[in-house]
């Protein structure tokens, strides 16, 4: 080969250029001796690298970046323990349908059977358990093809993480430049014939109901227009919050998991479920509660969800935005004719707020104080903690993609690093992390990353000195609470040790000013809240 652009360079340098050609701007990771060749080309390719303190943090950062920007997140780790540490974030990305590309090095095949540095029995197979696919590149051309496969899947199908591992000898060997990237195409629209049938059913409905999940997050205008045209009532899942405007008088909110929601769902005669798996973590019961005579329509991008659905009369495969726009078009102009009663829906919402207040006393006033202090476009990344469990029901999201919670895999330690990834990807919007005192300790070293980056990131920690949800669950099961009280560090002193700012409001009135100062700061601020604040 000859010429300035065609000379053989180490493949590690080429892979960075291939990522940049496919729209990647940021890589989250940690370099090591096994993956250092990937770093050879990062600067020349114009990629920004964010150094995490732990591979788990890097994975959550890539996840948060993807959720905030709508672009795939990329995490780069070493073979063996690096990839193992990344697998918890990949499991979260899998369960919550987030596009993350995991890049790792791997040991070459054919070496000694054991005792090599970072050796695993089956590294590729281990990652396959929490990804859509996990593949090893045979050579440079195969690696480029696998990148195109990954980005095509991110664009056209339900988002899932993928893992590409690169043998160390391949990273070190010379390789030709990558070919031009294959332009991904978007998701397909549903079958027009099925859309026409769906529109007919909805047009005839007396009480149409929309149930919208995270798969409809990009379809808020279409969903709102369709609900208005039909006069339909609506529910959203945790991931679908904000798809319907919270002020809509026919919107039940994100109360799908309330047992009483089944009674309300049973009132519908036609139900459109769009972009919602109706999974255990959506409902926390076996069935949604459809009336046996109700006509059910499913609109989903994932063929596996549609294939497993035996209840729905119509199953539309395709993009939620396109599908709801097509249904509205097939309905044509007209006035809504449904029989839903706003007063009854409002009464149901009030009843569920009262249930939350009874189950988790004292949290709603704290949630209200936080919500009142944040701009309407703020993104919140929450952890598995009681204050977040209450907030994902009680805190109305004004738009989609503004609240991100690790619903499916349910991992602790998500909020802080995911918020860092979001703040890196969207410096134009306020980003907040909301964590519990126990979960924050899983990934609190990433506070050093936030300081290093100078991110104006409020990190709100609810410090009650206990695993409150587990303690309550044990008591409900008549188990004497065990191992649910822990000794916490002085969170503010720990944050200051990294160079972060701190706030410790002593009243609800002090919460707003503390958040305002944190959002205006030149680095992260840990805001410690305790039950004494109420």
Image (spheres, grey):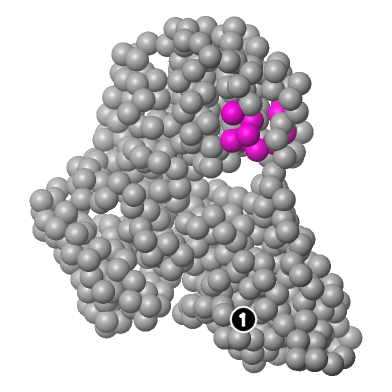
Residue 44: x percent and y percent? Answer: 61, 86
Task: Classify 10 Å Cα crowding around label 1: few (below 14), some (14-19), many (20 and above).
Answer: some
Compared to 435, does 114 lie above or below?
below
Residue that label 1 marks: 45
Compared to 169, does 258 lie above or below?
above
Quarter occupied by residue 398: top left
Q: Toward the viewer: 413 or 453? A: 453
Residue 435 shown left or right of residue 261 in the figure: left
Residue 108: x percent and y percent? Answer: 82, 85
Residue 150: x percent and y percent? Answer: 72, 61
Quadrant housing the N terminus:
bottom right
Residue 149 appears anywhere in the view: yes
- What kind of element bears circle 1? loop
Compared to 243, does 89 lie above or below?
below
Q: Toward the viewer: 514 or 528? A: 514
Residue 353 shown left or right of residue 202 in the figure: left
Residue range corresponding to the magenta coloring: 315-325
Q: Residue at x 70, y 67 (%)?
A: 163
Residue 302 appears anywhere in the view: no
Residue 147 on the magenta span: no
């Amino acid at each position: 080969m000859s010429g300035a652009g065609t000379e053989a360079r180490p493949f590690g340098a080429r892979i960075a250029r291939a990522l940049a050609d496919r729209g990647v701007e940021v890589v989250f990771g940690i370099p090591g001796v096994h993956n250092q060749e990937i770093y050879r080309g990062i600067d020349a390719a114009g990629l920004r690298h964010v150094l995490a303190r732990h591979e788990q943090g890097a994975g959550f950062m890539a996840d948060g970046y993807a959720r905030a920007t709508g672009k795939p997140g990329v995490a780069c780790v070493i073979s063996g323990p690096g990839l193992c540490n990344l697998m918890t974030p990949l499991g979260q990305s899998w369960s919550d349908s987030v596009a993350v590309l995991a890049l790792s090095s791997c040991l070459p095949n054919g070496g000694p059977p054991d005792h090599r540095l970072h050796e695993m029995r089956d590294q590729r197979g281990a990652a396959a358990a929490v990804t859509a696919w996990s593949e090893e590149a045979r050579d440079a051309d195969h690696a480029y093809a696998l990148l195109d496969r990954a980005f095509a899947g991110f664009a056209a199908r339900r988002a899932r993480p993928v893992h590409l591992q690169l043998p160390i000898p391949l990273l070190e060997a010379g390789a030709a430049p990558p070919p031009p990237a294959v332009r991904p195409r978007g998701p397909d629209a549903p079958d027009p014939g099925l859309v026409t049938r769906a529109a007919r059913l909805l047009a005839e409905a007396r009480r149409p109901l929309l149930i919208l999940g995270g798969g409809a997050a990009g379809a808020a205008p279409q969903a709102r227009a369709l609900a208005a045209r039909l006069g339909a009532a609506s529910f959203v899942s945790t991931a679908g919050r904000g798809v319907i405007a919270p002020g809509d008088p026919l919107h039940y909110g994100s109360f799908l998991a309330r047992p009483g929601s089944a009674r309300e769902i049973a009132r519908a005669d036609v139900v459109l479920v769009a972009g919602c798996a109706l999974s255990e973590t959506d409902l926390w019961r076996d069935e949604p509660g459809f009336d046996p005579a109700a006509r059910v329509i499913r609109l989903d991008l994932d063929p596996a969800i549609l294939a497993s659905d035996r209840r729905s009369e119509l199953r539309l495969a395709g993009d939620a935005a396109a599908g709801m726009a097509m249904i509205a078009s097939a309905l044509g102009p007209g006035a809504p004719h449904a029989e839903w009663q706003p007063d009854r829906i409002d009464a149901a919402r009030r009843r569920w707020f009262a249930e939350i207040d009874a189950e988790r006393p004292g949290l709603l006033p704290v949630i209200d104080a936080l919500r009142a202090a944040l701009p309407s476009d703020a993104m919140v990344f929450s952890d598995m903690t009681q204050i977040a469990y209450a907030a994902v029901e009680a805190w109305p999201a004004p738009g989609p993609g503004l609240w991100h919670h690790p619903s499916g895999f349910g991992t602790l330690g998500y909020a802080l690093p995911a918020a860092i990834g979001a703040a890196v990807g969207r410096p134009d919007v306020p980003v907040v992390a909301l964590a519990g005192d126990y979960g924050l300790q899983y990934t609190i070293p990433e506070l050093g990353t936030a300081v290093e980056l100078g991110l104006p990131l409020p990190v709100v920690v609810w410090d009650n000195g206990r695993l409150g949800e587990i303690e309550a669950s044990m008591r409900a099961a008549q188990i004497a609470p065990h191992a649910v009280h822990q000794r916490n560090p002085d969170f503010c002193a720990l944050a200051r040790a990294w160079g972060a700012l701190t706030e410790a409001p002593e009243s609800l009135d002090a919460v707003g000013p503390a958040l305002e100062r944190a959002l205006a700061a030149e680095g992260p601020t840990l805001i410690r809240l305790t039950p004494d604040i109420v």
